[in-house]
Image (tube, rainbow, N blue to C red):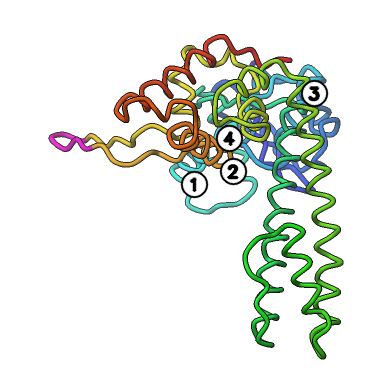
Amino acid sequence: MTYYAGLDLSMETTQVCIVDETGKKVASMKVESSPDMIANALRDVGGVERAVIETGRMSPAICHGLRALDIPIVCIDARQAHQSLKALKANKTDPHDAAGLAQVARTGFYKEVHVKSPAAHGVRSIITTRNHLVEARVRLDNMIRGLCATFGFKPGPGQGKAFIDRVMAAAKIPSLGQSITALLAVRTGLTAQIKEMDRVLRELAHRSQSCRQLMSIPGVGVQTSAAFVAAVDEVGRFRQSRTAGAYFGLVPKRHQSGEIDWTGRITKQGDSTVRKLLYEAANSILTRSVVLHLNVRMRPFLSWLAFNLRFRGLGVSD
């Protein structure tokens, strides 16, 4: 008898449902959300042909852990799973979700998504951490400017040493000095951590041949190249370079039904951070690169051509 499993994952526990090849429920249980406990639960039934799990925060760790234990696990898009489960059951519960995922595993009506490697997630975590630190520094700068404006002091634009020197002059104002001093102390720590994240990203980018190839494109720097390589992870899963645009949501959205057929704005699917960085790189190519002296109509074509030529020979496994 062939068995199929659905795993409804949460932070503490995972609901496991196992069905046979006819769709009949064989077992349903709740176990701890760890690869070992989930694998033991599946093996107690006699092993499964396929197990299905949704994308989520813990999905990469669980998927890699189960594959290391020789469990045939498939990760599917949570949006697709949501539509399938909504059609199967009216009430959304953990047992119902696990049972629905088991039926999806049995029928094979799913599209498997790539689970990125731990190295790729590590690079992404550094980029995400740096972005949050920069946002926190910007909020502190705005707070400092707002407090100074209340007392009639204008620090002016900028965020470097000149800005700090001007703010230090505001620290001598009565009733304002203690607040400014505390905010500047926190800002100094944030700035140091941002520089540390920049150093780590530079080291990662210069060690990777793929990042060095991408950085040869005008407008593409350390952060953009590292984010792109981490998002692609395995270049072999793209049949052609133009597929990368659709993967990052940079292709037009299309709606067709009967006599209706319209093309809208970009789909904005996939990694929003990489999409933002690619847009900034493209804008830099068109406005501040060595092709400024060329005809304006030729710039988009040359940018597209340069990007695709380099992507075709790109290997991101290093």
Magenta stretch contains residue 10 = no
Residue 105 horizontal/vertical position (percent) = 57, 26
Q: Counting other residues with Cα less than 10 Å from the Cα at mark 2, is it few (<14), some (14-19), or many (20 or more)?
A: many
Mark 4 vs mark 3, foreground winner is 4
Q: Are marks 2 and 1 in contact (CB under 8 Å)?
A: yes
Mark in the foreground, 1 or 4: 4
In the rendered structure, which amino acid carries the disc numbered 2?
A: Asp
Quarter occupied by residue 229? top right
Left/right placement of residue 294 relative to residue 10 reads left
User: Could you tell me how far apart the alpha carbons at marks 4 and 2 are, in whole angstroms?
Assistant: 6 Å
Q: Which numbered circle lies on residue 97?
A: 2
Task: Give the residue drawn at x 72%, y 67%.
Answer: 140
Question: How far is the residue under mark 1 from the one under mark 3?
Answer: 27 Å
Instruction: Give above or below for 192 relative to 196.
Output: below
Residue 234 is situated, as x and y percent measured from the top left of the image, at: 63, 17
User: CB under 8 Å between callouts 4 and 3?
Assistant: no
The residue shown at (70%, 19%) is 72
> Front-most of 19 and 52?
52
Residue at the image position 56 percent from the left and 23 percent from the top: 217
Q: Please provide the residue range marked out in magenta.
A: 257-262
User: Could you tell me which quadrant the C terminus lies in?
Assistant: top right
Say whether residue 259 is magenta.
yes
Find the residue positioned furthest to the left. 259
Q: Is disc 4 in contact with disc 2, using a CB cutoff of under 8 Å? A: yes
Q: Which SS class for mark 1? A: loop
Q: Which residue is mark 4?
A: 101
